[in-house]
Amino acid sequence: ARTSTDRFVVLLADGSADKAQMIARQLGSALRSGLQLGAVDSPLDSTFGISLAPEHADNAADLLRRAEVALNDARASARPSLVYVPGSDERFRRRLELSADLRRAILANEMSLLFQPKLRVSDGAVSGAEALVRWHHPKLGEISPVEFVPLAEASGSIRDLTRWVMRAALQQAAAWRSLPEMQIDLAINVSAADLVDPELGNEVVALLAELHVPSTRIVLEITEGALVQDAAAAARCMALLQAIGVRFAIDDFGTGHSSLSLLQRLPVDLLKVDRSFVLHAHEHDEDREIVASTMGLAHALGMKVVAEGVEHQASWDVLASLGCDYVQGYFVSRPITADALVAFVRDRAQSITPRPVSEQRLLRKPGTA
Ligand code: C2E
Ligand code: CA
Ligand code: CA
């Protein structure tokens, strides 16, 4: 049966998941061999979602919906076919519900920010903090940005989310203006879609002026994906902000596909080595090699290196010996509220006695409080 424009249902009267996948493969290859449209031979792409009765559902409506969920998952993971995995229907509904709810939640102020401190390795001082968004859903409780940021990106509400985060973070920076110890860097995450939006740059410039926040305090964290998607648009936005002193960090470095020439051309000040490499750098030679060569590369290009995901003393020691500039991670501190960050900064300032530069060292290792 044909259920919509490009959607068809095949009912197998008896069979198994294996048989259904075999038939999906055969149908897929028949379609790929093409359709003759006049003089044009047109190969057809196809994706299959499979659900089974009675294992996955015992009525037609549920069976079709679950086949559709499997189809969506197959598309999302670029696989030719997938069998429905029990539970993914609920996840699918949750995603739909959260996506539909995001705009309302942003307006209703259900978002908040936490701040994770970043330490300078040479003297252990707090050099900055990264703003990380949180969603307190009235019905569903705490929702992780790992779940809702990709939904915001996919559903087009990421610009609203970023506007909210940007304003909230800069308001916080403005509130810290009267505290001398809080004149630290503030890092804000921006998504690929933000960076190619021609409005972002001007909005940030206006917001900095409105709230009287020095632009040289601000670091925007962008992922490699954002640069690769539309390098020209990203470069325009970055140039505009760089001209007023905003700095840029490449986030999750090592997981994307940015080319060295691209990195060299863009005004990037910091590389954040992805935590997947940092987590085991003290015990796996390969991870340590990746971290070490990333640092060599960054330093050669005139950038500083931040290691994220530092969870143990052993990681800190390895990173320090490799010449890492800044460190962030649970070993130093989890993301904390704005007030807790002020207390953290004061506490650390007290534990570090100023010394001549040549003698500077970390008097109290983080995490020992
Ligand atoms: P990210 O930018 O790589 O942020 C770092 C994430 O790693 C944070 O998770 C942080 O809590 C976590 N983390 C910090 N230290 C450690 C550690 O030692 N070990 C481990 N295992 N994890 C650590 P969080 O806050 O859940 O954020 C997850 C991701 O969500 C962020 O990854 C970022 O991609 C995105 N995100 C968060 N806030 C924003 C935002 O305001 N805007 C945008 N566009 N994305 C955001
Ligand atoms: Ca980040
Ligand atoms: Ca990261």
Image (cartoon, rainbow, N blue to C red):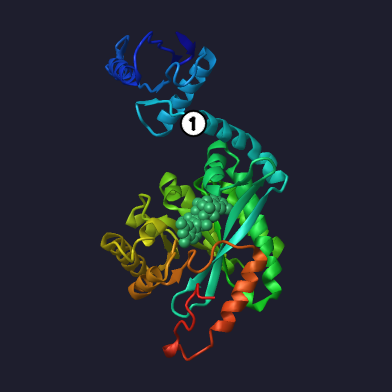
Q: Nearer the viewer, residue 254 or 340?
A: 340
Using the rendered image of the protein, determine whether residue 201 is visible from the camera's viewpoint. no
**Residue 250 at x, y percent in the picture:** 44, 58
Q: Nearer the viewer, residue 179 or 337?
A: 337
Q: Nearer the viewer, residue 314 or 181?
A: 314
Q: Please name the residue shown 66% across and 54% down the image.
A: 112
**Residue 74 at x, y percent in the picture:** 40, 29
Q: Nearer the viewer, residue 85 or 168?
A: 85
Q: Of all residues shown, which one is farthest toward the right?
A: 108
From the viewer's perspective, tell me whether residue 334 is left or right of residue 230. right
Residue type at mark 1: give it: Ser
Using the rendered image of the protein, determine whether residue 265 is visible from the camera's viewpoint. yes
* Residue on which the image places disc 1: 88
Q: Quadrant of residue 334?
A: bottom right
Q: Quadrant of the N terminus?
A: top left
Up-down relation of residue 344 to residue 71 (above or below) = below
From the viewer's perspective, tell me whether residue 180 is left or right of residue 39. right
**Residue 232 at x, y percent in the picture:** 45, 49
From the viewer's perspective, tell me whether residue 16 is left or right of residue 169. left
Q: Of all residues shown, which one is farthest toward the bottom?
A: 356
